Image (cartoon, grey):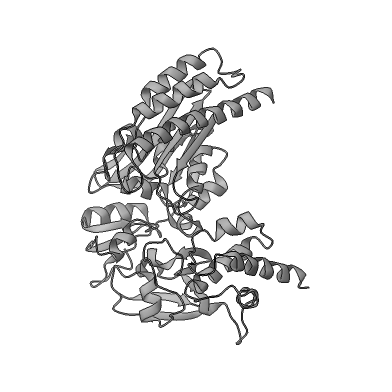
Amino acid sequence: MDNLGRDSAVLRPSSWRGAVLLRSEYPDASPICGGTDLMVDINFARARPSGLLDLTSVQGIDSWELTDGGRTVRIGAGVSFTTIIEKLSGVCPALAQAARTVGSPQIRNRGTVAGNLATASPAGDSHPVLMACWARVEVESVRGPRLIDIDDFFVGPKRSALAPDELIRAVLIPAATGAQQFAKVGPRNAMVIATTSFALNLDVAGRRVGTGIGSAGPTPLRARAAEQMLEEAMADRWDEPGTVDESLARRFGALVAEAASPIDDVRGSAEYRRHALAVLGRRCLTWALADLSREAAA
Amino acid sequence: MRVNVTVNGVAHSVDHVWALESLLDFLRERVGLRGTKNACEQGECGSCSVHVDGVLVCSCLVAAGQVEGCSVVTVEGLASDGELHPVQRAFVDAGAVQCGFCTPGMIVAAHSLLSGNPDPDDLTVREELSGNLCRCTGYQKILDAVHLAAERAGAAP
């Protein structure tokens, strides 16, 4: 708040408490961290907020930690995709995979998972992984903090459960206990908004299967029927997954595709997206089971 | 709004900065450094690449007000005492420049890559320069230039 003069419209709180107070006091100022979404809208005159609430100088916001006896990773809102790739590929392998597909080095150096969430685009690269990992979003306003389950977070295209006076403080993700995979389809390897994407989490400790679908519906989606089918199929083989069963992988992929509700748009047709999701679902399961088998054999 | 920032080692204190102004516009129009190019304004092309506190960013996606107190290095800050930086020299020698518009961003990104990885393989160079578009060269000479800069740095005593 020290840098807040009368003519100043970039608010730069140094503490989290200060950021929460300013969010409430200046509701028309847009929160900004990496700026990789917001600045595009500003540069193209699609957004004209009365000012900016810059979170990059908030103490501690760019750090991450293991909590809950090492079972959960708490990723601060200012942690960049580059940091996730460099530091968290062990505890959040699918999130690190997704982070590697974000934009370019320049974008990964600035962009954040919390920014993905705040924008709430169905194409956000983090989202399928957050769904597959049953992440929770830690938000706070002057009214107090709360945790939002990822299944309740996305309410429509670019619309989330975040209240106008709330800020995202961190994302809580259970540490991986089995195998995870993320895959994305787009016209080139870099600088691509997903045509569609898929994440799979085989949670060995919890005996659970998590999935997430990106860019194939108004919000990121969960493939519940695929999860249930695979949980039943895995019931007696979590610890010894054995060889990959081709027909199981195909059935899984088909259920993933069925869970999507894609549209035709500039990035691809609905038909192509469904087809791609069946392929991504099959591949992710094949890769993940191979990873599990390798670990079981080791 | 006033912004205090160090650019290429020189402290600047600039008044009347617009709150929504990008670092790119700030550098070009307020500080007068036009080596940093303005093309896509959406982070796609990399021609506005600069370092902010040592981190490679697209200056079009950073608000000028966010760099308060930071140190920014632009392409103009790489050469010293009238001598081209070795990465710049390598771009000249390898013939990696055609129209030249992408070159400043390409050189800043290549400089960033080589600072962290003095001997990158080809895939790494492609990945690390994937945020910088060139519509002239077909990229081969640019890859050659990065490898040339790496080789020369490796050969230097």
Q: Is residue B46 above or below residue B74?
A: above
- Please identify the quadrant where the N terminus of chain A is shown: bottom left
Q: Is residue B105 above or below residue A99?
A: below
Task: Residue B74: give x, y in percent of width and height.
Answer: 49, 74
Task: Residue B140: give x, y in percent of width and height.
Answer: 60, 65
Which residue is pictured at 53% across the width and 78% down the height?
Answer: B77
Q: In terms of depth relative to the viewer, which is nearer, A17 or A124?
A: A124
Task: Residue A100: give x, y in percent of width and height.
Answer: 51, 48
State left or right for residue A195 relative to residue B128: left
State left or right for residue A58 relative to residue B125: left
The number of numbered badges drawn on the structure is 0
Task: Residue A39: give x, y in percent of width and height.
Answer: 33, 61
Q: Is residue B76 above or below residue A131?
A: below
Q: Is residue A218 above or below residue A23?
A: above
Q: What residue occupies the far bottom of the structure in this picture?
A: B82
Q: In terms of depth relative to the viewer, which is nearer, B9 or B155?
A: B155
Quadrant of the rendered structure where residue A111 is?
A: bottom left
Which residue is pictured at 50% across the width and 19% down the height?
Answer: A248
Quadrant of the rendered structure where residue B137 is?
A: bottom right
Residue A56 visible in the picture: yes
Which residue is pictured at 55% across the width and 71% down the height?
Answer: B107
